[in-house]
């Protein structure tokens, strides 16, 4: 798996703490060269199962930019490779969508958050309801796999607002929704007053989404994204770009987050070593929040006993040597309980 | 020389400025340089400095105009009144400090009685006269009215500005009698404090009544019958040790015997000459008694031995704690520790945690009950879960205290209602100016809760309170158990007045419901007396506990969060499948 990070944004959304910067697009060519250099110096599989171009805002890069990028990765792609790109509704126009598809990208994901103008303003998004609807319709002309990101548990949310977002998404025919409960991040402009803490409404929202698209992870509904699932299965992946984390066996790689620093030295990475216990925790944590599950075998004895208890209670199931959660919403509590 | 010695203690209600006054006296006598000066320099423990209270009495030797002044600063809080008693045994005089704006308070009265019992010369000192709210006349009046001592000779001082300090020193020299005692008689010295020094071993702070103690002398500790050699002697000083070759009649000083064990120099024991012993010991005083008992358990169950070591070490410097091992189904292996009161309990727990790096759970404090069984046996119970089955109990006796409360008259109504709720029996009610002095007999188990906080809050902070044990009376008491998920949690059992059981039970489990976090399963919390459930609450099961977003670059951070949660869970106690946070074990303190 390959993740490519595009750390550029037009403006910074109020809730966002991702590694993305506004006013830096003059660095995009140097950045491209750095990506290519890092790619060439990284050991790669024969073919990638999946590629994910995320951001930031990948739709800020024009097609010629992607032409150069794809030139170096084409050899590692075949027609089974799932290739996703993130896009913002206001910067991804008809032509861009059309041509990015022609490059081989076969899945597109729009950061919509909501179709409600007031909420979009509240979140500091730079697109409108119309932009979002137009972008999705355009995408459907070329893509079978269209995802939108939605956000809930925002202070101004109401059930009516959320319901009309979900119904419209369904009407527009997207086959995947990522719906995130707002997380207040220290380094964002939001604080806890911007969050709505209403467990009942959160559960209601998840049920609502589930009635249209089947949930396969806490925040993901619809046709399973191979790349996402790979994360929950703790598969190896290469992270390309500023702050793009990579993972191989028991090591995690952290390149420079700062764009200029990354450009200066794209081969640098801080390495985090994971011990046996770390890996166990991650397998359980990720396995329980999604349909991935984890192997029964990896559990130490005391954890197996605890797991048995929860199987009896119907909170977990054991199938063909793997443990699965019957309720993703309890993933963290269950992990803490059994480990 | 002997006629130039003045030994005195500084006594007062809490916070009336004893330690600050000691600073000024030390400064005026030039015992420390300006550079060494610090506020309340006799409060040397971290916990004393942080809380701004004195816990342990401290002695200092000063020189003033050719006189030797031995000053003992004492604690004001009721829990530490034992420290006051010890200090008074070694003094001929007492400075009775009264805050010029607060006036006479409950511990002022209690401490005066102690001083009078010891026939000491009392010098009233009205402190904090720099305060705008100071009212010297009113306070002088109160001293005369409530404690019946002549206030015309009161010295007015400000320990803050230093005003009146010289006059006070002169008054001490003039009015405190020099120590009596025969310098030629056999050595007789009272150990009035002892502690452990990492370099010098066990140290005894003594007051010499007859004869002297000399370096190299063979001495006998009368209570133990053991003899030791005097290695070193020094006078107490806040900053350094002042070595000396002899501690003479009437003096105080520290005796170094090179002992490992503080038990060999028990406070209250007498040191005499081994070859030429005194015919009888110095005035004994009663050994300190613990009133309040609580289970103390390590959070990590494998830390029991560490806790034992820590208690052994702490005991060297705080002989007033008692402890014996106990076992709890809920908490594992720990100790039942006896304390002098609620503040003492708090201080000891904090010191154990801080000075020995332990994490501890304390159970609700209990008093010691006397149970007469149907076989006519009498047993003492200070752990409620050990109360025999009702069928075996003939009657239960509970300890009572005499409480002295001083309160502005506007609050009298509220206070009386409050004391009635606490099963108090009024013994006295006197007006002192615009305040009321109340004397009540109250079952002690009503006091080892948040009695003091409630008392303060019903009187906007104006009431002051002192108490002393007076003995046992029969009570109508039952044991109330708390069940979590159906199981009795032994560490949560309490003994309560029968008529209050239901109300307390209901309040207690309500508090617990708030403290117990929601878990994977629904948790029933019940209060029961015998087999009868008297109240019930439910902690609903968790419905959602997971973070929304978890992408590739985020996994380590998520794992670390989980590990942290896991650590948090480790600090809770699990009762069956249920995790109970530490605070829940003290939740009984939060109810009326
Ligand atoms: N304004 C003013 N404040 C004073 C004076 N003397 C003491 N204080 C303040 O009163 C508070 C209590 O003083 P301490 O000397 O710690 O009182 P204490 O009597 O030793 O207290 P305990 O040992 O806890 O009983 C401190 O904040 C002092 O700064 C004074 O003469 N004037
Ligand atoms: C990595 S972001 C980048 C996608 C793209 N730049 C965009 O925002 O349109 C992907 C999604 O994460 C979600 N997200 C970002 N910050 C979040 C936060 N603080 N709380 C919850 N979801 C968040 C948003 O739904 C966003 O669309
Ligand atoms: S949410 Fe997306 S568009 Fe908004 S600042 Fe973050 S990365 Fe950029
Ligand atoms: Mg003090």
Image: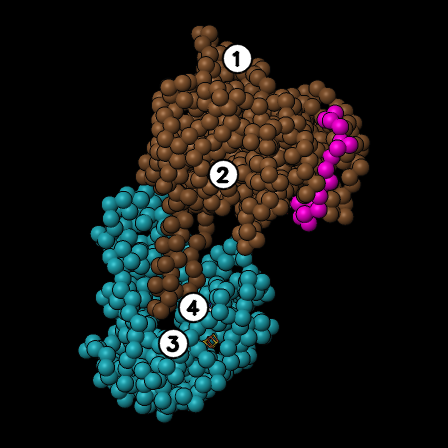
Chain colours: A cyan, B brown
Query: Mark 1 vs mark 2: same chain?
Result: yes
Q: Quadrant of the C terminus of chain B?
A: top right
Label 2 C-beta lies within 8 Å of the nearest ligand 4 atom:
no
Image position, residue A76 (x, y; %): 23, 81
User: Mark on residue A257?
Assistant: 3
Quarter residue A242 falls in:
bottom left
Q: Cα distance, mark 3 to mark 4?
A: 25 Å
Query: Mark 3 vs mark 2: same chain?
Result: no
Residue drawn where x is 43% and y is 22% of the image: B272
Q: Chain of mark 2?
A: B
User: Mark on residue B236?
Assistant: 2
Residue drawn where x is 54% and y is 38% of the image: B61
Q: Nearer the viewer, mark 1 or mark 4?
A: 1
Near-viewer residue (A91 or B241): B241
Query: Mark 3 vs mark 1: same chain?
Result: no
**Dot 1 or dot 2, earlier in sequence:** 2
Residue drawn where x is 48% and y is 64% of the image: A183
User: Mark on residue A178?
Assistant: 4
**Dot 3 or dot 4, earlier in sequence:** 4
Q: Cα distance, mark 3 to mark 1?
A: 74 Å
User: Mark on residue B556?
Assistant: none
Q: Which residue is mark 1?
A: B395
* Above or below for B153 versus A16: above
Q: Is residue A126 visible?
A: yes
In the image, which residues are magenta? B147-164
Q: Cα distance, mark 1 to mark 2?
A: 51 Å
């Amino acid at each position: 798996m390959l993740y490519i990070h595009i750390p550029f944004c037009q403006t910074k959304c109020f809730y966002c703490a991702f590694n993305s910067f506004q006013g830096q697009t003059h660095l995009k060519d140097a950045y491209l060269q750095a990506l290519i250099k890092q790619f060439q110096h990284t050991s790669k599989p024969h073919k990638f199962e999946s590629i994910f171009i995320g951001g930031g805002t990948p739709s800020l890069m024009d097609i010629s930019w992607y032409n150069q990028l794809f030139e170096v990765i084409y050899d590692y792609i075949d027609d089974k490779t799932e290739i996703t790109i993130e896009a913002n509704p206001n910067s991804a126009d008809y032509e861009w969508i059309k041509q990015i598809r022609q490059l081989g990208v076969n899945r597109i994901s729009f950061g919509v958050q909501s179709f409600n103008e007031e909420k979009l303003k509240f979140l500091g998004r730079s697109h409108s309801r119309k932009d979002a609807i137009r972008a999705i319709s355009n995408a459907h002309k070329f893509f079978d796999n269209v995802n939108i990101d939605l956000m809930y548990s925002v202070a101004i949310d109401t059930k009516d607002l959320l319901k009309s977002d979900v119904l419209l998404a369904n009407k527009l025919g997207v086959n995947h929704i990522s719906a995130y409960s707002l997380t207040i991040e220290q380094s964002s402009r939001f604080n806890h007053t911007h969050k709505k803490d209403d467990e009942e409404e959160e559960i209601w929202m998840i049920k609502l989404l589930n009635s249209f698209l089947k949930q396969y992870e806490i925040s993901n509904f619809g046709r399973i994204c191979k790349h996402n699932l790979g994360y929950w299965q703790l598969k190896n992946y290469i992270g390309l770009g500023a702050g793009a984390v990579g993972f191989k066996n028991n090591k995690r790689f952290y390149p420079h987050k700062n764009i200029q620093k990354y450009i200066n030295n794209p081969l640098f990475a801080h390495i985090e070593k994971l011990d046996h216990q770390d890996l166990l925790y991650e397998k359980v944590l990720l396995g329980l929040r999604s349909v991935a599950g984890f192997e029964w075998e990896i559990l130490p004895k005391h954890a197996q006993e605890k797991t048995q208890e929860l199987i009896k209670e119907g909170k977990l199931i054991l199938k063909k040597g793997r443990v699965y959660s019957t309720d993703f919403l309890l993933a963290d509590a269950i992990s803490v309980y059994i480990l | 020389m002997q006629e130039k010695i003045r030994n005195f203690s500084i006594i007062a209600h809490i916070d009336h400025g004893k330690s600050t006054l000691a600073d000024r006296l030390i400064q005026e006598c030039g015992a420390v340089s300006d550079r060494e000066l610090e506020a309340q320099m006799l409060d040397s423990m971290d916990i004393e400095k942080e809380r701004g209270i004195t816990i342990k009495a401290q002695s200092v030797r000063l020189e003033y105009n050719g006189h030797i002044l031995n000053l003992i600063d004492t604690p004001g809080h009721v829990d530490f009144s034992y420290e006051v008693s010890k200090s008074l045994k070694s003094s001929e005089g007492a400075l009775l400090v009264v805050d010029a704006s607060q006036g006479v308070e409950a511990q002022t009265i209690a401490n005066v009685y102690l001083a009078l019992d010891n026939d000491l010369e009392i010098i009233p000192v009205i402190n904090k006269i720099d305060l705008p709210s100071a009212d010297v006349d009113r306070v002088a009046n109160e001293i005369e009215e409530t404690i019946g001592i002549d206030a015309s000779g009161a010295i007015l001082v400000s320990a803050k500005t230093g005003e009146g300090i010289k006059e006070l020193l002169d008054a001490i020299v003039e009015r405190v009698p020099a120590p009596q005692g025969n310098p030629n008689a056999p050595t007789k010295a009272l150990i009035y404090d002892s502690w452990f020094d990492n370099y010098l071993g066990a140290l005894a702070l003594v007051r010499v009544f007859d004869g002297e103690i000399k370096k190299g002398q063979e001495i006998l500790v009368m209570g133990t019958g053991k003899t030791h050699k005097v290695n070193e002697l020094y006078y107490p000083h806040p900053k350094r040790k002042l070595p000396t070759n002899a501690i003479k009649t009437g003096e105080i000083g520290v005796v170094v015997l090179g002992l490992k064990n503080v038990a060999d120099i028990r406070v209250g024991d007498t040191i005499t000459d081994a070859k030429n012993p005194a015919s009888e010991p110095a005035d004994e005083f009663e050994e300190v008694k613990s009133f309040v008992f609580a289970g103390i358990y390590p959070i990590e169950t494998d830390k029991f031995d560490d806790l034992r070591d820590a208690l052994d070490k702490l005991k060297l410097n705080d002989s007033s704690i008692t402890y014996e091992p106990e076992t709890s189904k809920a908490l594992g292996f720990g100790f039942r520790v006896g304390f002098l009161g609620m503040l003492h309990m708090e201080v000891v727990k904090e010191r154990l945690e801080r000075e020995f790096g332990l994490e501890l759970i304390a159970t609700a404090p209990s008093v010691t009950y006397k149970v007469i069984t149907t076989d006519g046996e009498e047993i003492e119970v200070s752990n409620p879960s050990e109360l025999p089955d009702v069928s075996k109990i003939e009657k239960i006796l509970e300890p009572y205290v005499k409480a002295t409360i001083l309160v502005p008259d506007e609050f009298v109504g509220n206070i009386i209602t409050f004391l009635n709720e606490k099963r108090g029996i009024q013994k006295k009610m006197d007006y002192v100016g615009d305040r009321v002095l109340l004397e009540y007999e109250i079952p002690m188990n009503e006091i080892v809760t948040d009695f003091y906080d409630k008392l303060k809050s019903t009187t906007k902070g104006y009431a002051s309170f002192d108490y002393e044990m007076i003995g046992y009376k029969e009570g109508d008491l039952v044991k109330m158990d708390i069940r979590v998920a159906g199981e009795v949690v032994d560490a949560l059992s309490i003994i309560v007045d029968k008529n209050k059981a239901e109300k307390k039970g209901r309040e207690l489990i309500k508090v617990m419901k708030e403290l117990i976090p929601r878990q994977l399963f629904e948790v029933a919390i019940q209060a029961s007396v015998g087999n009868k459930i008297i109240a019930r609450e439910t902690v609903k099961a968790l419905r959602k506990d997971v973070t929304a977003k978890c992408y590739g670059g985020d996994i380590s951070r998520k794992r670390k969060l989980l590990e942290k949660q896991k650590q948090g869970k480790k600090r809770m106690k699990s009762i069956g499948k249920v995790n109970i946070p530490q605070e829940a074990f003290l939740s009984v303190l939060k109810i009326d």
